Image: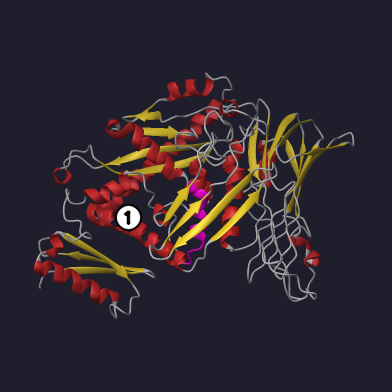
Amino acid sequence: MTGWQFRVDRGGTFTDIVASRPDGRLLTHKLLSDNPTRYRDAAVAGIRDLLARASDGAAETASTTVPDETADAPVIDAVRMGTTVANAPHIPVHLGSMGTSVKEVIARRGNAMRPGDTYAVNDPYHGGTHLPDVTVITPVFDRPGEHGTSGERILFYVASRGHHAEIGGIAPGSMPANSRTIDEEGILCDNWLLVEEGRFHEAETRRLLTDAPYPSRNPDTNLADLRAQIAANQKGVDEVARMIDNFGLDVVQAYMKHVQDNAEESVRRVIDVLEDGEFTYQTDSGAVIDVRVTVDRAARSATVDFTGTSPQLATNCNAPFAVVNAAVLYVFRTLVDDDIPLNDGCLRPLRIIVPPGSLLAPEPPAAVVAGNVETSQAITGALYAALGVQAEGSGTMNNVTFGNARHQYYETVASGSGAGDGFAGASVVQTHMTNSRLTDPEVLEWRLPVLLEELAVRRGSGGAGRWRGGDGGVRRIRFREPMTVSTLAQHRRVPPYGMAGGAPGALGAGRVERADGTVQELGGSDSAELGPGDVLVIETPGGGGYGPAPRDTTDTGIETGAPAGTDPGEVSDDLQAF
């Protein structure tokens, strides 16, 4: 056959072939890069297959083709239903749960969406996680007049999520330690129409932020952050349009499907070597997360069953399903060696079962602010234990918020990561579902009336073992004016577990050292009023160790960065505080 052109993208798992027919139409084909029982070379086999289909007419009905605006509808539906194609590679609890927010908007808005519309979601019972995390969602429409299109068909969605440092609630910073209902945690954006046909609903959104039992203390900053998210989405819309201009809609649609297919196959390969496992994870409150992972070898799939998990709590540690979904997605993505984007294809081989009314599927008006940040870490720890992957990291984000009428601030404090078979844990790092960065000390002290006195490695807090767990950290902040401080943290009673005979990591702790010399101990979820000269001290947990500790530890289990034969406590000062 003459007049055909082929483009080959050979990846580690899949090889993709895009064929341009003599009549200008495009065909696509995807096959495993390595399949010696079927063919010697994937690219050659794929080209032959496409030509064979074309010669016998099978190409007109092949599921891998995207021939025209009508036949590509199934591919469009896969994206339109809110399945995630790609996420940025940081803060898994944010990004792994965004698809749930998008699906909620699609389900409730349907055909009512118009070009120029943008929506905001943070309601944990309608696609959100907890109230500070606001997801802004913008549909991407086709362009009128192109290939006979109307400009009213949705092709994709783009979304951005930001943690708003203040969104109302009973405590400054909107991360209250003692909330008992969702209303006490701040403002709900339930499928909120933020922009309508290009017009920003600023006045309406301001009323939403201020006309509430516990309004936002800083609506101007909220509106500025929302504008930034709207602008980020518009950049996404523009980039998608540019991609379509460069490659054509059919190619873009096909490759977005291939990205998910690739992720699916990658996770199935992981499942092929997994064994069944189960674990009961105990939290500081006494509540438990029960999980059983059951592998179906024939179907190359797995069931992740949380039946047996404690009922929803009267505290704020309840986690909406979006958080559970994000944690499962994260854990199975980390088991894949290939460099693939985080997307919903990873979840196709997995069936997640969560009992309604449980800690992991609460019913309104249960409080949830700690579920997103703390219970997400517990879910992750439970899954790694059930799969026998590695010892637990700190198992907490060590959340700290402080503020007053003028200032609000939120941070997560790094801790130790868990060791595994062949590697020691890292010290003072963000682990698992967090991964946020701390504000630079100079910026922190410039913008807020505080002094950062110390951020240091908490020596010896990592669990002992053949491979040591990473050490936690110590953070000291001195206040220069009255502030309310709230903490949300775990592993103040139950230590992070070790694995395969390794010791657990050290418990975390918190306290207030008063200017008058007295000391007030803080619980994991606690709050305190601090005055000028008072110091907040946070000591984060260490990670669990892996394997029994050898009698002679000079050559094994050395903390990352320590020379062999060196005691981790003798590492040079430049690693002790930063």
Residue 230: tell me if it is visible: yes
Choose top left, top right, bottom left or bottom right for residue 408: top right
| Colouring scheme applied when the structure was drawn | secondary structure
Residue 302 drawn at (x, y percent)? 45, 58
On the rendered structure, is 345 left or right of 132? left
Choose top left, top right, bottom left or bottom right for residue 266: bottom left
- Residue, x 44% and y 42% (percent of image)? 160
Which of these two is toward me, 205 or 323?
323
Residue 117: tell me if it is visible: no
Residue 370 drawn at (x, y percent)? 61, 39
Q: Residue furthest toward the front?
A: 308
Which of these two is toward me, 328 or 373?
328
Report the magenta residues as a range: 325-337
Where is 301 relative to 449, above or below? below
Magenta run includes residue 465? no
Q: Please state, as top left, top right, bottom left or bottom right, where the N terminus lies in the image.
A: bottom left
